[in-house]
Amino acid sequence: MTGIEASTSPPALPRWFGPRASADDPAASALIALVARGAGWADIGGAFNLNVRIDAEPPVVLRIHRPWVRRGRVAGLRRLRERLQETQVRVARPSRIAGGDLLRVADRWAEIEEFVGHVQPPAGEASYVRLFEELGRFHTALKAVWEPGPPEPLDDHRTFGQLRYSVGFTRRRLGPGSEPVVRRMQQLTGELSKLRKGLELPCAPIHGDYKLSNAGELSDGSWATFDLDFARVRERLYDIAGSLNHIARSGPDGVGRPVELLEPRRLLAAYERTAPEPLTPDERRWLPGALALIPLHWAATAGLASDSIHQAESAMTAAETWWSRRAELSS
C-alpha cells in the first residue's frame, strides 16, 4: 500500500496538533482572571493562539499558544521583538507575567505583551501597495537584528517530500472521495518540483504570515506589524508569495481580487523600493511556482486543518490558476 492509497479507517490527528485554547477552559480562565485583576477583557481573535486584550492600565495582550510551540521558540521570539524595538519597524514589546517571561498553562505556554492601539488598514489598492512597502522594511529590520535567531517553528512544507506526505495524510483522512483532487495535487507537485531544480533562491529571515490582518495603522500614520509566530529563515520569496495569495484569497469587489485578475508587478515594485535587495533572476523564474505552492499547501493539509474536500478543491483551483499564468508571471 502506498502513502496515498485508501486505508480502512482515517488516521488520527497528530497528538501535538491540538485546538486553539479557549477562554472557557478552567486553566485559561484562571490565568485571565489572574492577569486582569478585575479589569475587563476580550478575545481579539487569532487562528492559532488565544489572544486576550486585558483592559488594564496600560492595556496588555495575553497570548496562550498552541500545544506544539516549545518554550525555546516563544522565548526566542520575545528576544527578537525586543531587538526590533531598536529598528524603525513597530512591533509589540514583551511584558513580564507572574514575575517571569513565560508561564505554563496546562500543556501550553502563555506570555504577555503590550497592546498597540491601531486600526486595520482598509482593503484596497493603496493599502496593498503600502503592505508590500512595509514588508520590504520589515525584511530590512529582520536582517539587521536576527542573530541569534529563535529556534525554527514547525514547518510542514519546507520540502517537496513533506508536501507529498501531507497529500497522503489528507487522502487517508478524507477518504476515496478525495481521489480526484489528490491527483491534481500530485500532478502540480511534480511540475513545481521540476521548476525548482537548479534555481538558487536567497534565504533570509521572514515574517511567515504577512497580510493586512497582521498589520495595523497607528495614530501617526505609521504601521505596526503583528503575529511573528511563523518568523523563520526561509526563501524570502515565500513571504512575498504568501502576501499575494492572501490578497487574492480575500475575494473581489473591493476586498481583494481573484487570482486571474491580480496584477503582482506594482506590488513587487513596492517591495523592492524598501527591501534589502531586489529580486534575483532566479526568484523571478520561481515566482509562479512560489505563488502556486502556497494554496497547494493549503490543499495538501486540508485533512489536518479540516475535513472538507471542498476546501482542498478550492485551494487547488487557486494553485492551478497561478500555475497557468507561469509564462506571464516569470517574464
Image: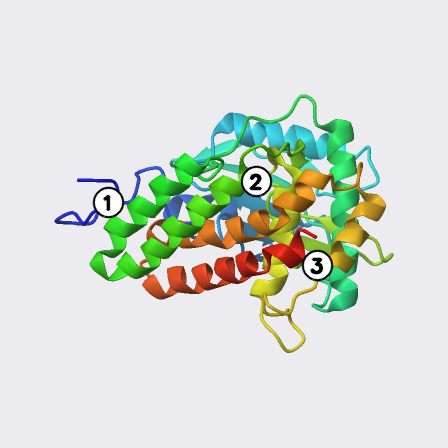
Question: Does 326 sit above or below residue 274?
Answer: below
The label shown at residue 12 is 1
Q: Which residue is mark 2?
A: 230
Q: Quadrant of residue 329?
A: bottom right
| Proximity of marks 3 and 1: CB atoms separated by less than 8 Å | no
Under circle 1, the secondary element is: loop
Q: Is residue 53 left or right of residue 136?
A: left
Q: Which residue is mark 3?
A: 264
Residue ID at (79%, 65%): 126
Q: Is residue 122 visible?
A: yes
The label shown at residue 265 is none
Residue type, label 1: Ala
- Label 3, label 2: how many angstroms apart (C-alpha)? 23 Å
Q: Position of residue 228 (x, y in %)?
A: 62, 41
Q: Camera-side residue: 169 or 19?
A: 169
- Label 2, label 1: how many angstroms apart (C-alpha)? 25 Å
Residue ID at (46%, 40%): 157
Badge 1 crowding class, 10 Å Cα cut-off, few under 14, some 14 to 19, many 20 or more, is few
Residue ID at (26%, 45%): 4
Badge 3 crowding class, 10 Å Cα cut-off, few under 14, some 14 to 19, many 20 or more, is few
Q: Quadrant of the N terminus?
A: top left
Q: Camera-side residue: 215 or 23?
A: 215
Under circle 3, the secondary element is: loop
Under circle 2, the secondary element is: loop
Q: Residue furthest bottom?
A: 253
Q: Position of residue 331 (x, y in %)?
A: 70, 52
Residue ID at (75%, 28%): 145
